[in-house]
Image (cartoon, coloured by chain):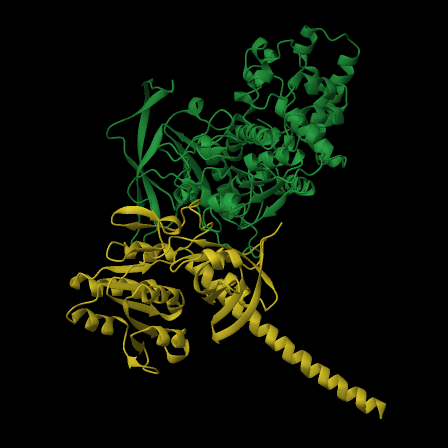
Chain colours: A green, B yellow
Amino acid sequence: MSHMDRARHEALAREELVKIRSIPLSPKARLQIPVQDMPSQDPMVRRANMFEVATGYTPEQAMLESARCLQCKNAPCVAGCPVRIDIPGFLAKARDGDFAGAVAVIKRTNLLPSICGRVCPQEKQCQLTCTVGKALGGVDKAVQIGRVERFVADYERGAGLLAAPPVTGSTGKKVAVVGAGPAGLTCAVDVRRQGHKVVIFEAFHKAGGVMVYGIPEFRLPKALVASEAEVVESMGVDFEMSFLVGRTRRLNSLLKEDDFDAVFIGTGAGLPKFMNIPGENLVGVFSANEYLTRANLMKAYEIGKAATPLYPSRRVAVLGGGNVAMDSARMALRLGAEEVRVLYRRTREEMPARGEEVVHAMEEGIIFDFLSSPTQVLGDQNGRVVGLEVLSYELGAPDESGRRRPVAIKGSEKIVPFDTVIVAVGNESNPLISRTSPELSVDRWGHILVDEKQKTSIERVYAGGDIVLGAATVILAMGEGRRAAAAINEVLQ
Amino acid sequence: MHSEHKILSKRQLSEEVYRMEILAPLVAKERKAGQFVIVQYDEEYSERIPLTIADADEEKGTVTLIFQTVGASTHKLALKNVGDSIVLLGPLGNPTHIENYGWAVCVGGGIGLAPLHPIVKALKNAGNRVTVISGARTAELLIMQEEMKALADEHIIVTDDGSAGRKALVTEPLKELCSRDPKPDLVVTIGPPIMMKFCAATTQPFGVKTLASLNTIMIDGTGMCGGCRVTVGGKTKFVCVDGPEFDAHEVDWAQMLSRLGAYKSIEQAAHDRCHLEMSLQKLAKAQGAAQDAAETITERSNNR
């Protein structure tokens, strides 16, 4: 596939726009408008830099892509969106070039569209149910809702229109939000809007949670996350950074001594899972959390500036098939690895990663070893990784998740040389808050149990995001943050 | 966004060892013996450095940190002065389990004497008879000696070169103490990993319960990264949330040592660079002073 530059995308879109202006746009005509590809950096260039891979639609592309929307009365896309954005509504405005109007429609239900437009798995949500995609026989032909969402959000920022939501007069009530990730930030904004005082407690030194430590710069620029956090701060939300609730101060003290009227816990999925195979504690084996945190939050890639060291890697194995695995593999490549292989037990079809990320990874030269998984990590006399023993699999009968179960092929073990292994097989719940607050009910995986309003077993304490859901997505976390905020606002009335 | 903590006092204890008192009222209030903090010299490029707490004053709202300059980040931390602020997160890790064991022997090596101090204090307060073994390469590197002397029922000092106390390794008196009848009820050891490893090997034949406080590489210190993992009793443990103290007889010391050395070459290079920069700065300062002096002389002579 040859790479097309931005100017070419723009020129083609302009021609198409002229064409459709001269004809009345029947549904049939709309279906004939070509899907607008996302302009991106040349794969051979971007694999060696940290700049954003997808560079965003041009205005022409955004208008054209929006014109593909059939404005279905039943709007199946809205049902597919976890926060129920009025998708036909914002696409109609974008189609007419009213980008500010479009972003205003989105912001009625989604506070962070520039982030969601970049990281939501749209092909599993709004775009999965899109009528256009169904009519054209493929989800990849659906209206590219996420790309238009990103465009109008970036337009708003670029035009200097980014503004904090209005805050009503002070109520004198106080709410603590634990964790400055997607769930916490969303909850904080919605609670603050109602005039309650809000303090966010964050363990790291920067706000954003997974959006700063996990998702890499080349997929979600950190300046963008920082500017969203600044908007929250400009609403009068206080941030207490490097503050670990459970250790620096207990949940109970926040409620009883510090007079918080309610607490929202959005601490995320914070305990990496390993494979439980021999050799996993050798030097050169990293959890994806560690690998990505070093590179993203600690900026280890800025060699000479950042003090956090990077492990020198030449041949890297990434274990897993989700977004975090893709991020780790592509980061390893950018940090100078000569060969990066993703080992996944199933096949491309079963990969949980966002479709666009898999395509981008393949374009950049990441090698995928499907139907394979390691049985042990091999080390040298210094305790450093030298390779993996890898077992091949085939797909058997479907399991309870409906996916075909991978079955090991006996005797297929082979030894593959690697110096670095990144384990990206998910997270368990961080036990810190539940251990220091025994009256907080959790399930057997440590996820905090909540009711339909996100309320926990403790009065006035709510929770949401990955600490409730297990490893999920940014948008689902935001949805839970909003629901909790609504419940908090209701009880504080 | 608030996260900064002010440095209230700073003292250089030896060539590479510094003592700082940091304003952190909540940490000072919550911390217990055995816990640690993570500090950063700035929010942009600093490493996250786990440091054990040497002392705390709840009334003043301060914690005392003692650290050795081993890499780029600790060097940059050492360049901070009174009035400057640093990032500090804590207290982290599980507190030492304190009870009246009877006779406790606390073995501290080098910088490890700092985190040992609150443990000695807590054990003493719980009614234990406490013997302290203070060890260092040389007399200059023995720290917290006044505090230890004041607390310990028995205080044994050893140095590698004999410049203070006995010329011996800490394991020598430790073995003698374990040979007494009755033998110690508990040994706590904090210091270089190799020392803790040999302390464990020393007490094992006597069957004396021995705790070691591990100082592994960490990023977040809250359980999120797993960089600090060690094998204890055949199981993987995270030092930050499961530790930092473990049964010294169950720790896989060889693995721990190799994991600690993961970035050794990079750290060494950074350390050397820091020293080079510091001496260059000194040299530049000296040259600047010489030049100033020369200029003053020229000026004076011109004025004449």
Residue A336 in view of the camera: no
For the C terminus of chain B, give its image quadrant.
Answer: bottom right
Above-or-below relation of B164 to A21: below
Near-viewer residue (A48 or A212) = A212
Above-or-below relation of A155 to A279: above
Q: Position of residue B259 (x, y in %)?
A: 36, 54
Q: Quadrant of residue A228?
A: top right
Near-viewer residue (A483 or A202) = A483
- Rendered residue at 40%/55% (across/down): B262
Residue A188 in view of the camera: yes
Q: Quadrant of residue A193?
A: top right
Q: Quadrant of residue B159?
A: bottom left
Q: Specify the farthest residue to the bottom.
A: B304
Q: Specify the farthest residue to the left.
A: B181
Q: Position of residue B150 (x, y in %)?
A: 37, 76
Number of marks: 0
Q: Position of residue A51 (x, y in %)?
A: 61, 41
- Rendered residue at 61%/52% (across/down): B2
Q: Position of residue A39 (x, y in %)?
A: 65, 29
Near-viewer residue (A57 or A425) = A425
